[in-house]
Image: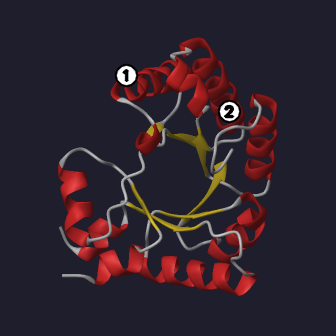
Amino acid sequence: MDTAELAKYIDHTLLKPQASREDILALCAEAAEAQVKSVCVNPVWVPTVAEALAGSGVLTCTVIGFPLGATTTAAKVGETRDAVVHGAHEVDMVIDIAAALAGDREALVEDIRAVAEAAHEGGAILKVIIETCLLDDAAKELACSASVAAGADFVKTSTGFRTRQDALDMIAAGATRIGASSALAILKAS
């Protein structure tokens, strides 16, 4: 796979709480040059990213209930609506990890469905982050089935990969998107 094709799989990500406006604008410039799929930032930066990426073909993405997923459904819905109004095309939501571990499918479906509806109403897509490093196999399966039942568009996993080959291997295994803070390193590697 060539670099331009690989770039279309990548969400160029900066979620550090200390990121400055200059850091975010540099991220957007890198993303526009590399033509990645999206830039993923904390909600406070959505208006900045949407403005910086306007006309570039790169989407604006944000995280909801990040990093713990332990906020209320109403708070996640509010975050989602606010992000979409300010230009987010994609929303990456962290599930209620405790509900997944407890086997509470109903709570998971309700939480995800409410966020999916808020995202879809605003024309955005929902990617559900299931934080696989914290879940056993049964909870992973439950989180995936609940995401499908609730109308999510994608399910995301935490992997910790760092190399281009890791990204290519994940795509070969069926991944359709790669979120990475090391996007440029992955794209520049040969």
**Identity of the amino acid at label 1?**
Ala
How crowded pointer 1 is (Cα within 10 Å; few <14, some 14-19, many 20+) is rated as few
Tell me the residue at 38%/53% (across/down).
177
Where, by quadrant of the figure, is residue 190 drawn?
bottom left
Tell me the residue at 64%/40% (across/down).
69
Q: Is residue 21 visible from the viewing direction of this image? A: yes
- Is 162 in front, or is 33? 162
**Identity of the amino acid at label 2?**
Val
Element type at mark 1: helix
Residue under label 1: 138
Residue under label 2: 115
List x then y, in percent, for residue 29. 56, 84
Tell me the residue at 32%/69% (across/down).
162
> With respect to residue 146, does 44 lie above or below?
below
Which of the two marks, 1 or 2, is nearer to us in this view?
A: 1
Determine the CA span between mark 1 and mark 2.
23 Å
Element type at mark 2: helix
